[in-house]
Amino acid sequence: MKHFLDIASYKKIVDYFDSLKGRYLVIYSPTSMKLVGIAPENNRRFVNAHLIGKNAANIEALCRSQQFDVVVGLGGGSPIDIAKYAASLLHCKFVCMPTMLSTNAFATNKVALMREGRKITIDAKLPDEIIVDTDVILKAGVLNVYGLCDILSIHTALFDWMLADRAGIERINQEIYRASSRLLDQSIRLARRLGVPTAKDIAMLFELIGESGHITNIYGSGRPESGSEHIFAKEFERRIDVPHGISITIGLSIMSRLQNNYSTDVNEALRNIGMMRAVQDYPDLRRVTEETLASLSSRPDRYTILNEAVMTHAQIKQLVARFFGRVPEKVA
């Protein structure tokens, strides 16, 4: 399995587009096109990710209609996931162009899509090439730190893995566990000094966020970085449209308290990169958080604290209050 750094190159995205020839398909987000400074050609080779959506059936229909030699994913998580799945179906070259570092989608072999109204995870191919355009990524501003949330979620994910190991459900792979712990520590150190990323920060963010995806590729599942906080995030995002980093921030903070595993270091890292302020920018999150927790259940393939803790209505109210304000002294 290739390491993502071995297929990454720092170059201008516009230069790559100037060299594009033959049968190619570009899955893009309009915002990313503006960041890059190019306009999509008016033909079937350019597909707006917002129009096709993350619906697996739509992507499959597109791939049945014509053949391509190269699929390009330009944007954040959604365009990259759509392009990654299309390239897997077409068995062709996949070029990934992240325009923000809000997710580790550029380094994983999984995609999160929808089928018949349900969010599903599907195996997909890794990129054959990743183009890192620092100037374009910088234009995304604070969105670049959102990808750190998926690394900070290692804190709750490893605790859940420990519970699974203790229950005899999924034994800990010590090498992967240690690698994930080191990555978490590195990310906390970076977050302590990071505000809005500068040019010199982009390479470090790219490497850390990509490494979180690479570790899950090696292990074969998201277990090393994905636990109860991601189960929460999946249900939360089904109810409201917010960036993944927002839902992970809430899930990580609340699940760590449910685990009796609250970390001042992780909380300060989230606060320093602006995630706690970002949460305040979205209305109704408190209500949706309560509704999500009330409906939350464990996943059959991922043993977590949700298999062991039953939250009462009062406890949900208190956990939510601890996060959003008016903090009671302790959770009953």
Image (spheres, rainbow, N blue to C red):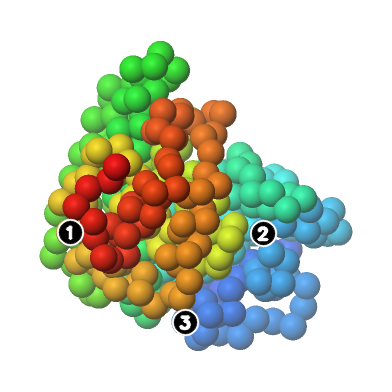
* Cα distance between the residues tagged 2 and 1: 33 Å
Q: Is residue 243 left or right of residue 204?
A: right
Q: Position of residue 109 (x, y in %)?
A: 53, 42
Tell me whether the residue at label 3 lies in contact with that at label 2, contact meaning CB atoms closer than 8 angstroms.
Answer: no
Closest to the camera, between mark 3 and mark 2, is 2
The quadrant of the picture occupied by the C terminus is: top left
Mark 3, residue position: 35
Residue on which the image places disc 1: 268
Relative to 138, 131 lies left or right: right
**Secondary-structure class at tag 3:** helix
Could you tell me which residue is drawn at 61 percent across and 85 percent down? 39
Q: Amino acid at mark 1?
A: Glu
Residue that appears at 78% across and 58% down: 58
Indicate which disc, 2 or 1, sits on the residue closer to the N terminus.
2
Q: Identify the residue at image location x=27%, y=46%.
A: 331
Q: How many marks?
A: 3
Callout 3 crowding tier (Cα within 10 Å): few <14, some 14–19, many ≥20: some
Estimate the spatial distance between the alpha carbons at disc 3 and disc 2, rounded to whole Å.
22 Å
Residue drawn at 69 percent across, 49 percent down: 118
Asked where in the image residue 214 lies, by quadrant, the reply is top left
Circle 1 crowding by C-alpha within 10 Å: few under 14, some 14–19, many from 20: some
Q: Which mark is residue 54?
A: 2
Relative vertical location of residue 216 with respect to residue 140 in this rendering, above or below: above
Q: Secondary structure at mark 1?
A: helix
Mark 3 vs mark 1, CA separation in Å = 31 Å
Foreground of the two, 260 or 173: 260
